Image (cartoon, rainbow, N blue to C red):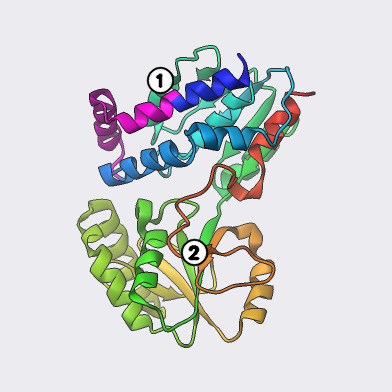
Amino acid sequence: MSIEKRISELVRLGDYLRSGSEELDEVKLKAKANNAWFTMENINFALDSIANTMLRRDILEQWVQRYEFGQISKKIGLILAGNIPLVGFHDLMCCYVSGHQALVKTSSKDSILTTHLIDRLNQKNEFQILERLEGMEAIIATGSNQSAKQFERYFAKYPKIIRRNRNAIAILDGPLRKEEMQALGRDVFTYFGLGCRNVSKLYLSSSVNKVDLMEQLHEDYNYLIHHNKYKNNFDYNHAIYLLNGDDFMSSGAIIMRRHEDIVSRIACIHYEEFDDLASLEKDIMTRLGEIQCISGNVNMENIKILPLGACQQPAIDDYADGVDTLHFLAELSRS
């Protein structure tokens, strides 16, 4: 199949996602019932993002024209995560558009939506969903830091992309406007904070009013506490931090804890204060391997900073962990 035909099939899939069909509505309800973290709001957000930032003809054509594809089709093992709805779709799309066959190990947390989109592409020779991967010639796997070590050992002989835990950070210089705090909230709370592009750590200047920030986040997101899983995490972490005597603030929406780690618990966000941007930039440069993306209201010379609120709107070429997935697959198609 030509790349032009593959693009047309992806465009057709995007049209389907935007159609609001009863079939798709039924699948969304099944996905919601299968995973309590997959609220209808989060499912719709993921589907809308895929349909509008990836599955449009102009976007797809501009994307693929930067790569040189060969005629060799290989079997690519894909081990998909399931932390947020359709988090593995970009890997599926890269594999498909580059002409390879995808051997897919879905996450049990996100099998329903993923399988449905594969079925809608109706390219049964291009995708196989397997319980156990075998017969692959290359691997793209996403998991935790612990599982990544296992992947590295188990798939040592294969060409591979292995992804680990990463999170987003935000850098804020005050005083903060209401619109900036609301935008930050989208970076923090979308998907309950479960995605690798969710902000889990704040770097705050001394001019940021933390009380005002917490009050705004509470105003916009206190409804999350009515979600049973989120509330259980909030209550548990609040109790642990109290017992440990940690330095933290809390609202009805989130706990903000002073801590140097970038990764934070569900319903929590870490923060540190900084004195000057130059020193902070040097520190962040040493930790880029832990960071998926950065948002903020400041500028840095050597670090890309997204506008606040943009973390969960990645472009089609915003590759996870900064590794160009389509380049990796294009090279395999020529060798």
Asked whether 21 falls inside the magenta stretch, the response is yes
Which residue extends farthest right?
Answer: 335
Q: Which residue in the structure is indicated by mark 2? A: 307
The picture places residue 204, in percent across and down from the top left corner, at 49, 79
Residue at 58% of width from left, 47% of height from top? 318
The picture places residue 241, in percent across and down from the top left corner, at 37, 73
Element on which disc 2 rests = strand
Q: Main secondary structure of the magenta part?
A: helix
In depth, the one of 143 and 188 nearer the eye is: 188
The picture places residue 56, in percent across and down from the top left corner, at 47, 34
In depth, the one of 280 and 270 nearer the eye is: 280
In depth, the one of 185 and 313 nearer the eye is: 313
Q: Amino acid at mark 2?
A: Pro
Q: Looking at the image, do the residues carrying marks 2 and 1 touch, with CB atoms under 8 Å apart? A: no
Question: Where the C terminus falls, by quadrant?
Answer: top right
Element on which disc 1 rests = helix
Residue at 47% of width from left, 74% of height from top? 271
Left or right of 162 in this view: 107: left
Q: Is residue 66 above or below residue 186?
A: above
User: Which image quarter: residue 62?
Assistant: top right
Q: Amino acid at mark 1?
A: Arg
Start and end of the magenta stretch?
A: 12-36
Residue 120 circle label: 1
